[in-house]
Amino acid sequence: MSTQGPAILLIHHNHGVTDNLKSEAFDYAELGYSMFVPNLYQLLCYPGKHHLGRGQDIQKETSDPQFVAVNNKAWDFLAAQPEVDPARIGVIGYCMGGRLGVHFVAQKPAVKAFAAYYPSIKDEPETPIRPRHPISVARELKCPSLIIYGGKDHLSPNDVQLRVWQGFLANGQPLEWHFYSEGLLGFVAPQSDGYQPHLAKLVRPIATEYLTRQLEV
């Protein structure tokens, strides 16, 4: 009998691999997942255990394709672990990680399921650093998705969220969309100014149940 099980690649937010994401990974590991939280900034040659206050500057000089490339390396490492079933790997992204996750998952058809907390998708033009808008890229995903947004998200206001929703609907895959009218950007992250513990407590079981169902834990 195979001893391989499901796994999750967790793509961090703007602040890097913070303590709350380590705790999140530990909680999922207790549920039976192999977890990997790569420090994308370190992989891109920005040293440090975390990058509080530095993430925006790093994003301004690092292209989306560069982020996708290091996520591909992280995926390959995770999928190669003997305890991991490569057919049962999901991706979770938080804020920046949700936006980058759209780009990563779109070019990685092996992803079994995608979940994103308030992906930081803005109404902005395409540039050499951001050559494709994530709303267009969302149309290319080939797996189910769970998207969680707050109604008071200042980076992705409601009109942008509507376009994000339409982009995900267009890919033809199952979509679970959760919207909380009072939610701020970063409402599950304790280090965020928008942290709302009551919402964080509310959405965790939703994400957990979704991933359990999709990855067959």
Image (tube, grey):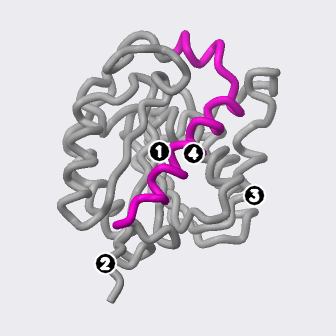
Q: Is residue 184 above or below residue 103?
A: above
CA–CA distance in space, label 1 to label 3: 17 Å
Task: Assign the magenta stretch its main secondary structure.
Answer: helix
Badge nearest the viewer, 2 or 1 = 2
Q: Is residue 167 visible?
A: yes
Mark 3 lies on residue:
140
Q: Disc 4 marks which amino acid?
A: Gly
User: In the picture provided, is 29 more to the left or to the right than 213?
Assistant: left
For label 1, count other residues whose C-alpha is less than 10 Å away and answer few (under 14), some (14-19) or many (20+). Answer: many
CA–CA distance in space, label 4 to label 1: 6 Å
Mark 2 lies on residue:
3
Q: Disc 2 marks which amino acid?
A: Thr
| Residue occupying the point 48% across, 23% down | 41
User: In the picture provided, is 192 more to the left or to the right than 56?
Assistant: left
Q: Disc 1 marks which amino acid?
A: Gly
Mark 1 lies on residue:
93
SS at circle 4:
helix
The first of marks 2 and 1 along the sequence is 2
Is residue 27 or residue 163 the one in the foreground? 27
The first of marks 2 and 3 along the sequence is 2
Q: Disc 3 marks which amino acid?
A: Glu
The image quadrant that residue 110 belongs to is: bottom right
Q: Is residue 148 visible?
A: no
Farthest residue in the bottom direction? 1
Badge nearest the viewer, 2 or 3 = 2
